[in-house]
Image (spheres, rainbow, N blue to C red):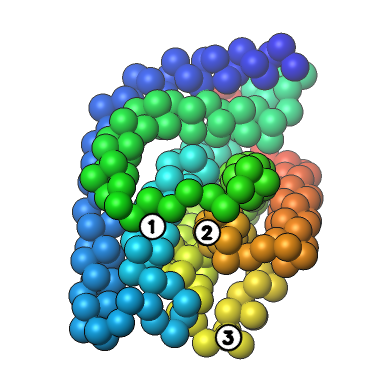
Amino acid sequence: MKKYLQVIGIGLQNNLQYRVNYLTRTLFSFIPLFAMLSIWQTIYASSGHTGLSNGFTLAQMIFYYLLVAVVDVMTAVNEDDWQIAADIREGTISQFLLKPIDYLTYRLCLFFSGRIAFIAMAGIPLAIFIFCHREYFLAPADATTLFVFLFSLGLTALLNFFISYAMAMLAFWLLEISTFIFILFAFEYIASGHLFPLDVLPPMLKQILFFTPFPYQLYFPISIYMSKVTGAEMWSGLLIQFLWVVVTYGLARLMWNRGIKKYSAFGG
């Protein structure tokens, strides 16, 4: 355990060297956020109603996108999959095969250290942005809702990481995996609720998406906070999200075990 705490410490030091990059990335991420807020404000204004058939008022819709920004800052995978693929392609993982350290746990520690550093850099501008839209802020229904939301947020972070890790394992078989990463990202952007709440989709399509892990990467924890899912539906959704974490963890382990048998490095 001590060695992984040291990995987190080293990861924090390395990530803080790129604090200007993190700050710039956060500031530029507000541009598409501004665009989406403007689009929905225009839609609601043109409809002449305070709410649409999807059950969102204008205030709820704007707050939804504010929560998207918060969840992204806390759980998104930035460059971990690229770095893992580079370790495989360049033979850097050879050192981990000779040391008493688990590569998946090592990368998970670096992922969390990266999130801590990113939150430290992005927290202030994000807080200012939310403060500027404070009239749309909605408090959680109760303490239980807030606790379940935070727990679901932790599962979301793990789910995002394990999916990205499993995708990066393709580097054992393919020289270039960027196309697959971009395809996955494009699908996740829509199916997880980044582009719009899944409530705007036809009910049948929304139901189909919930047979995949994607809604649990963003939409589900936000729905918990906004009380869009409550009671038995919330607890069953939380169980399904946990099961997806277990499944993707197993897939990540399986692909590593299969890939490492194919791996070979020379020289060095």
Q: Could you tell which of marks 3 and 2 lies nearer the N-terminus? A: 3
Label 2 crowd bin: few (<14), some (14–19), many (20+), radius 10 Å: many
- Return the residue at label 1: 63
What mark, if any, has residue 229 been given in the picture?
none
Which residue is drawn at the image coordinates 49% and 33% (left, top)? 115
Residue 103, horizontal then vertical, whole percent: 68, 31
Secondary structure beneath disc 1? helix
Which is nearer the eye, 79 or 128?
128
State the image quarter where residue 264 is shown: top right
What mark, if any, has residue 226 been given in the picture?
2
Compute the Cα span from label 1 to label 2: 9 Å
Residue 188, horizontal then vertical, whole percent: 50, 64
Which residue is drawn at the image coordinates 48% and 28% (left, top)? 116
Which residue is drawn at the image coordinates 38% and 51% (left, top)? 137
Q: Which quadrant of the rendered structure holds the N terminus?
A: top right
In this rendering, is residue 180 above or below 159?
below
Residue 263, horizontal then vertical, whole percent: 68, 42
Compute the Cα span from label 3 to label 1: 22 Å
Q: Is residue 245 visible?
A: yes
Compute the Cα span from label 3 to label 2: 19 Å
Label 1 crowd bin: few (<14), some (14–19), many (20+), radius 10 Å: many
In this rendering, is residue 119 above or below 135?
above
State the image quarter where residue 32 is shown: bottom left
Q: Are marks 3 and 1 in contact (CB under 8 Å)?
A: no
- Return the residue at label 3: 203
Type of amino acid at the residue the image marks with label 3: Pro
Q: Could you tell which of marks 1 and 2 lies nearer the N-terminus? A: 1
